[in-house]
Amino acid sequence: MTLLRGTSLTLRLTLLFATVSGAVLLVLGVVVGHLVDRHFVELDKEQLNGKLELVRQALAETGSPAEVIGLRQRLDAALVGDHELIVRIRSTDGRLLYGSDNAHLLSRHLLDTTSDYPQLVIGNDGRSLRLLSGRAVLGGTRGLGVIVEVATGLHHHQAFMTTFETALWIAVSLAAFTSGVLGWAAARSGLAPLRRISHEAAKITAEHLDRRVPVAAIPVELAEVAQSVNQMLARLQESFRRLAEFSSDLAHELRTPVGNLLTQTQVVLAQSRSSEEYRDVLASNAEECERLSRTIADMLFLAKADNDMLVPERECVDLRAETEALVEFYAALAEEKSVALEVKGTAHATGDRLMLRRAIGNLLSNACRHTPPGGNVTIELAGPKAGAASIIVRNTGETIPPEHLPHLFERFYRADASRKRDAEGAGLGLAITRSIMRAHGGDASVRSAQGVTIFELQLPA
């Protein structure tokens, strides 16, 4: 496997096809060879048993060992045509009573035991023989007992098996090569959809993120891969869109205060001014610098949140007390706009008190700025429910269109793009609020209907 690391998938499949087909054919050939060899053994056994019975019948008609010698012509006639057949008859004391013309190929060693199954022995010329031995009786059941040995050469069988094994190796080699070629063709054809995916993906650039890999023409096994690629492209397209809008909005937010600073400074430097005029310009410049400082601080905060660098401190926070303190802070703004503020319920949560205060403050500030005169802002606190505490900020006013709701927590997003951002914020408050919630293991959501907008914060209780 290490050797194949870095090689093409087509080559791996080709080698796999060739190896598997060669192994299967080799095992099949070994099994067939074994069966053929067993078949030859059975044929030899049947032949040797037949010849052994023939000799036994002839010996049964012979009365004495002397008559066995005269039996040669009869036995020779019965064995005509079997050039590989060897017959030898011995008495129990080892005397040779009869031997065929090629009996000298058998060893002089007398088998003391007989077997009903042929045994493989080596002849005096070094060739393999299959031998079957048995006992016989001269002249009937009460005659002299003798040992009959019947053997046959295996030359033809071995020549056949040698040819068979040669043909088997050639067939296995050809089959492995053919399987490799066919496997290469099949792999090339089967991997064509992957090449099409690669070809389509190569066309996708930052300027053409709207392109997608066609799923309809791809096999089912690769459809999931194509869908995952398309989903990734959709996420990238959305990220690029948000990044482009973010860069544009950030440039706009920074350009305005920097432009104000530059213009005011150039006007003041154009001619001599009184100390009071210089003081007014410096105060105005300080306000613009504070705005720049807040924007930069908010961007650094969000950058930390994006990189999981926000580590909230863990302490028990009384959300009711924090909310009432914020309501008291925004009371003057609410009174100026004739907006009623109300806090309901109590809740506690574990988290960073300053971060949670900032998140609630962002929602309260946003609600006060977007609530028309005579409207209401209600903060509802709910205790632990399903392991979470909730903070709901509800304000009356214009209903936010549904298409804008999913984007309200994005940086610099404005539901009304034609309206300039007010001086109180840079459009990062809601984004910071969601980042704080997620850093605490919670989340933020919004819904708007029938003139009521509701922001909800979920926190681990």
Image (tube, grey):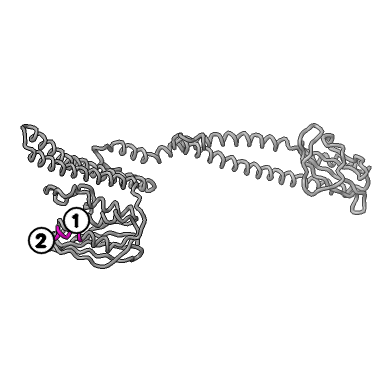
Q: Give whichever of discs 2 and 1 has the lower sequence position.
A: 1
Instruction: Please check the rendered image and state whether residue 334 is part of the magenta-colored stretch, yes or no.
Output: yes
* Cα separation between marks 2 and 1: 15 Å
**What is the x, y in percent for residue 139?**
90, 50
Is residue 325 shown left or right of residue 157?
left
Label number found at residue 435: none
- State the residue at coordinates (25%, 45%): 297
**What is the x, y in percent for residue 40?**
70, 43
In-front residue for pair 10/282: 282
Q: Which residue, given by chain and number where applicable, does mark 2 sit on?
A: 373
**What is the x, y in percent for residue 48?**
77, 45
- State the residue at coordinates (35%, 53%): 313
Q: Is residue 391 visible?
A: yes
In-front residue for pair 225/269: 269
Mark 1, secondary structure of its residue: helix
User: What residue range appears in magenta?
Assistant: 328-335
Q: Is residue 449 visible?
A: no
Instruction: Please check the rendered image and state whether residue 456 is part of the magenta-colored stretch, yes or no.
Output: no
Is residue 284 shown left or right of residue 106?
left
Q: What is the quadrant of residue 89 in the picture?
A: top right
In-front residue for pair 257/37: 257
Q: Which residue, given by chain and number where applicable, does mark 1 sit on?
A: 365
Q: What residue type is disc 2 on?
A: Pro
Q: Residues within 10 Å of mark 2 (few under 14, many from 20)?
A: some
On screen, 459 above or below 270? below
**What is the x, y in percent for residue 211?**
26, 41
Is residue 448 shown left or right of residue 190?
left
